[in-house]
Amino acid sequence: MKYLRFADSVFNNYFDVKPDVRSKDWFLVDNAGSMLFMAFSYLFVALTGPKIMRAFKPFDLRRPIMIYNMLMVAINSCVVYLCAVGGWFTHYKLLCQPVGSADDPRSYQIVYATYIMMVTKYMELLDTVFFILRKKERQLSVLHIYHHFIVVPMCWGCIRYLPDGHSNFALFVNAFIHVVMYAYYLLSQMGPSVQKYLWWKRYLTKMQLTQFAVVILHSLWLYHPSCTYPRVMQTFNAFNCVIFATLFLNFYRKNYTAKNNMEIIEESSNKLGNMCISPGSVKQD
């Protein structure tokens, strides 16, 4: 509880943001200690797991990964739907949408979507576990580990303090990207007859980069004098988007230069998804 009180006092005293009454007592939201334990346990596993696996043969996880990809497509689709009908395709303003009130039933759809998104970020830690068990250490890049580590406290902060309104836009966009991303991973497991149609793999990275640019620009509107929405979470999100975009650009330049473009397109037709497209990816091969 001391971690929770500390987090609440920081948000209250420095950012004038209090825990949201709609979500503060929900499972996993009411305890900062469990969130920190999960994040640092992940970091420990990511750094030590490959060393432990040196004594073992790689596991064949094709079926579990296929089931996992199906679940991620379904859950992220649910998040997209809730965000759309709960606000962004109905009554939300694109810029400076305020936090909803506890007596507005429509706002709960967005809050539920934010909570589900937090749960998916815990689930996505399995991406790293799959890499380790399959001895795909080269996929454990700085981008991959940093992304999975940092989104745990980020999403926890969103659901506890600002579960709807302007900041939810980033989650809405991210959930849509993940639907496409995990659908690609699922299709890439369905054999050569399907793989030859996955030439559009490289555009997933472009979609990720576009996502970062859109979220950063959307966050900047919070600094308009007329906007009173708390800036803390979106500023942190925008800062991390800059980091993610920088790492993604570095990845894109290394893997999709004009010199090796034809080679990569050929590989994508003959192999199962052989690249880490995004920080939340599960390499299928």
Image (cartoon, rainbow, N blue to C red):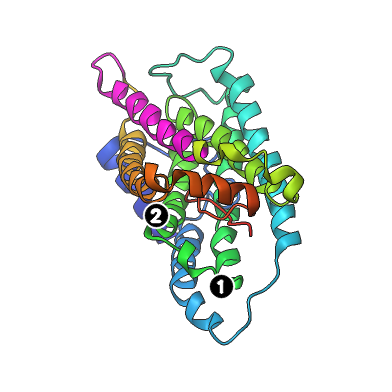
Q: Is residue 272 left or right of residue 16?
A: right
Local packing at callout 2 (Cα closer than 10 Å; few below 14, some 14-19, many 20+) is some
The amino acid sitting under disc 2 is Leu
Dividing the picture into quarters, in which one does residue 133 lie?
bottom right
For label 1, the residue is 135
**Which range is magenta?**
204-227
Q: Position of residue 251 (x, y in %)?
A: 38, 50
Q: Position of residue 109 (x, y in %)?
A: 62, 28
Work out whether 34 lies above or below 216: below
For label 2, the residue is 143
Q: Is residue 225 left or right of residue 188?
A: left
Magenta span dominant secondary structure: helix
Q: Is residue 172 left or right of residue 270?
A: left
Placement of the C terminus among the 4 image quadrants = bottom right
Q: Position of residue 10 (x, y in %)?
A: 30, 47
Quick one: label 1 or label 2, which is nearer the N terminus? Answer: 1
Mark 1 vs mark 2, foreground winner is: 1
The amino acid sitting under disc 1 is Lys
